[in-house]
Image: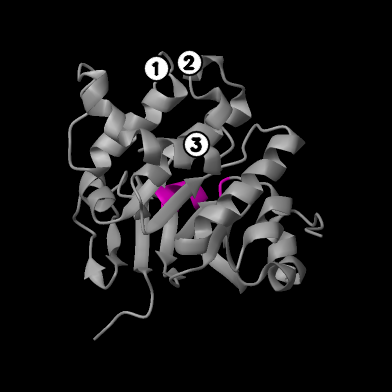
Amino acid sequence: MTDSFLLRTEGLTKEFKGFIAVNDVSLHVRQGTIHTLIGPNGAGKTTCFNLVSKFLTPTSGSIFYKGKDITGMRPAEIARSGMVRSFQISAVFPHLTVLENVRVALQRKHGESFDFWRTEKMLARFNERAFELLEAVGLAKEHVALAAELSYGQKRALELATTLALDPEMMLLDEPTAGMASADVERMIALIRSAAEKRTVLMVEHNLGVVAALSDLVTVLAAGAIIAEGDYASVAKDPRVVAAYLGSSLD
């Protein structure tokens, strides 16, 4: 039977020495959508995200990607299957140029190792695609700059470019706007929206303005369990969600 969801978890649970961080979470992410996990501090969002991306092993429950049980797979195997965790799997090297960073990622996309000693002629075949990606994230003019010289917002944009270089079918974005100034947040919203035109996105995000702007579906966690799910407007008014956020308005 064909799975109608690109990513699906059933009964996902994670226990740490008697503390249940994620409790029986069944998450269903439809292809072509931006699906966001939100919740107050300690809700289990990051743990759930680490379970889905296989940086943690669940105590119980199952994870399915494209209908295949991936519960026992390792992160590198998941990435090769088309699901890439941005800002962790994507490699940004501070002492390489912006262009070189993207070319390194493109080597991996073509099944090659990260060989820094290859001749310029051999690496130049990646230039056209690398420039396309840099243009997409607004960094084409900075292609000769060292990654270490970029602003924080530009570094996050470069990380997104290296992730896109792997041409993932699904992107897992962990707090993509954390620590950004408002101008950089607006730019990242536009970049994520553009990247999601041909991809599925699962995102953890604290900035509720970003959540409202991007999300097709929002899943709210509290105390490790799902307490609400729906579009942003509906979950923002859900009494259980408001209570979980200590009575603060989500509008």
- The residue at 39%/21% (across/down) is 93
Label 1 environment density (alpha carbons within 10 Å; few <14, some 14–19, many ≥20)? some
Q: Give the residue type that dot 2 points to.
A: Leu
**Which residue position is annotated with label 2?**
146
Question: Residue 102, located in which quarter of the rendered image?
Answer: top left
* Magenta part of the chain: 42-50
User: In the image, is residue 47 part of the stretch drawn in magenta?
Assistant: yes
Q: Give the residue type that dot 1 points to.
A: Leu
34 w.r.t. 58: above or below: below
The answer to whether marks 1 and 2 mark residues whose Cβ atoms lie closer than 8 Å is yes
28 w.r.t. 142: above or below: below
Dominant SS type (magenta): helix
Viewport quadrant of the N terminus = bottom left
Q: Nearer the viewer, mark 3 or mark 1?
A: 3
Report the side of 169 relative to 147 (left or right): left
Number of on-image labels: 3
- Mark closest to the chain's N terminus, 1 or 2: 1
Residue 210 is labelled as none
- Residue 20 visible in the picture: no
- The residue at 54%/44% (across/down) is 136
Viewport quadrant of the C terminus = bottom right
Give the CA separation, mark 3 to mark 2: 14 Å
**Which residue position is annotated with label 3?**
134
* Closest to the observer, 59 or 138: 138
